[in-house]
Image (tube, helix red, strand yellow):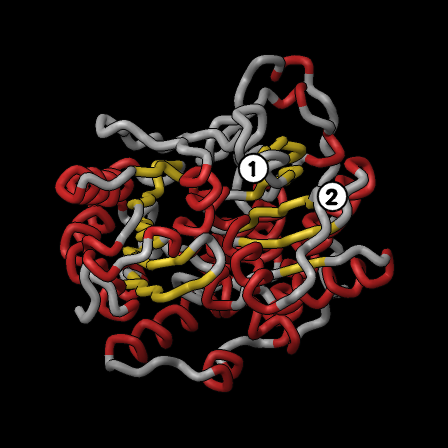
């Protein structure tokens, strides 16, 4: 590494971000919250594909294997040494407990040994700042504030009203402020994509296959209804079944902004059973597994040839229904909150139909909208370092007894 601490200018605000909340081990160096100097991600997709989903124990082991070389690679790519850094930022939750602990333990040891500040970052806040980071790099005009943030991924489906710091030198609001407006009551949208894909024999992760196959089907072939959620007195004071962060009780939120995808997933299962699609799914799964085992990545034409038209129609209808749910509730919340912009982030933000329809609706309403690039949609550490910057300026540092919080709330 070429530089050293003697030549380091403290005004550069160099923050090393570390992300290990699920199945990506990531590290990045970001300057002053808006200039990405490096970003390295080690994916575990191949490790978990054979099991049809993320296995927490395997994820933790892979993080242990990858964390040191990934951080070194990020510093090398940024042409930095450890002493050049001004702070260490790490995801403290929500996520898988064992996976989080790997990143946190390494970050704490690094911060202690270098005598650098440690900054704890909520994973959901990181996804929001993935969009803000790229928008600041690509546009001279900042995104109008306040903004409505839809964080939609395999583990999360949340709507937040997000407002930037009003005064970075004041303790009153020196960091970003988030107000939860809506969330899923059960499965996250990305989880529903993956479960339906697995049901149809498309393997894991299946969300991208659904996205690529949907254009070959009729999205109106299977009439999935928009989920309607009413206030339920028996849920007063209780939290939802979602695996994501614990947040406000259901009755504290407007039912119009609550999501539910478990019923849609069940409807797909019922359709498969009633229309004799189970055998085709089994044949498809075996063919794709054989291709992967032989070292070949299946091409779109190959996967499409394994799908009959009823299956393609089902895929298109399912995807359209998920996007309908996300779109209607997001824009209803944007209207109620009177936001000046909308941002969509997380793994499902890479879905092409979602991007197209959200952009079209935002343009119709004259509402600025922003998405992350495909690379920044998935878990990465640049978003963690970017989200840490306001906290660095405000002196909001974590103690060295920081612990992982798998159900961490964003507030």
The residue lying at 63 percent from left, 35 percent from top is 166
Disc 2 vs disc 1: Cβ atoms closer than 8 Å? no
User: Dot 2: what SS?
Assistant: helix
Give the mark toward the camera: 2 or 1.
1
The x, y position of residue 247, in whole percent, is 53, 26
| Residue at mark 2 | 329
Could you tell whether 343 is left or right of 5 in the image?
Answer: right
Q: Is residue 58 above or below residue 229?
A: below
Q: Residue at x 63, y 46 (%)?
A: 149
- The kind of secondary structure element at disc 1 is loop
Q: Is residue 56 above or below residue 3?
A: above
Q: Earlier in the sequence, mark 2 or mark 1?
A: 1
Kindly report the distance in space between the C-alpha atoms of the residues bearing marks 2 and 1: 23 Å
- The residue to which callout 1 is attached is 176
Q: From the viewer's perspective, is 394 left or right of 358? A: left
User: Which residue is found at the position 24% from the left and 64% from the top?
Assistant: 80
Question: Could you say which disc has been placed on residue 42 in the image?
Answer: none
């Amino acid at each position: 590494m070429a530089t050293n601490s003697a030549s380091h200018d403290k005004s550069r605000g160099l923050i090393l971000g570390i992300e290990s909340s699920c199945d990506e081990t990531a590290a990045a160096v970001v300057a002053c919250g808006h200039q990405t100097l490096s970003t390295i991600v080690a994916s575990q997709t191949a490790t978990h594909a054979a099991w049809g989903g993320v296995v927490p124990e395997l994820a933790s082991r892979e993080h242990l294997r990858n964390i040191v070389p990934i951080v070194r690679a990020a510093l090398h790519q940024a042409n930095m040494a450890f002493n050049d850094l001004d702070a260490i930022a790490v995801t403290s939750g929500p996520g898988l407990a064992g996976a989080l602990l790997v990143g946190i333990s390494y970050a704490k040891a690094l911060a202690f040994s270098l005598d650098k500040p440690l900054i704890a970052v909520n994973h959901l806040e990181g996804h929001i700042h993935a969009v803000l980071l790229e928008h600041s790099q690509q546009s001279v005009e900042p995104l109008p504030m306040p903004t409505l943030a839809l964080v939609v991924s395999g583990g999360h489906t949340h709507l937040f009203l997000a407002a930037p710091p009003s005064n970075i030198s004041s303790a009153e609001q020196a960091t970003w402020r988030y107000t939860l407006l809506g969330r899923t009551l059960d499965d996250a949208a990305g989880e529903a994509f993956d479960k339906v894909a697995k049901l149809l024999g498309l393997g894991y992760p299946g969300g991208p296959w659904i996205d690529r196959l949907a254009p070959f089907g009729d999205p109106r072939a299977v009439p999935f209804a928009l989920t309607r959620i009413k206030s339920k007195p028996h849920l007063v004071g209780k939290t939802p079944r979602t695996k994501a962060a614990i947040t406000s009780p259901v009755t504290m939120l407007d039912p119009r902004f609550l999501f539910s995808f478990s019923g849609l997933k069940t409807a797909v299962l019922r359709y498969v059973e009633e229309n004799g699609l189970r055998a085709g799914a089994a044949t498809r799964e075996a063919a794709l597994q054989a291709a992967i085992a032989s070292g070949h990545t299946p091409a779109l034409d190959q996967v499409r040839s394994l799908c009959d038209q009823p299956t393609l129609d089902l895929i298109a209808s399912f995807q359209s229904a998920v996007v309908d749910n996300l779109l209607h509730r997001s824009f209803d919340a944007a209207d109620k909150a009177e936001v000046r912009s909308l941002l969509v982030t997380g793994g499902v933000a890479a879905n092409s139909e979602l991007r197209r329809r959200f952009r079209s609706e935002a343009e119709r309403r004259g509402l600025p909208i922003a998405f992350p690039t495909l690379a920044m949609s998935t878990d990465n550490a640049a978003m963690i370092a970017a989200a840490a910057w306001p906290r660095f300026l405000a002196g909001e540092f974590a103690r060295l007894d920081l612990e992982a919080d798998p159900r961490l709330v964003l507030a």
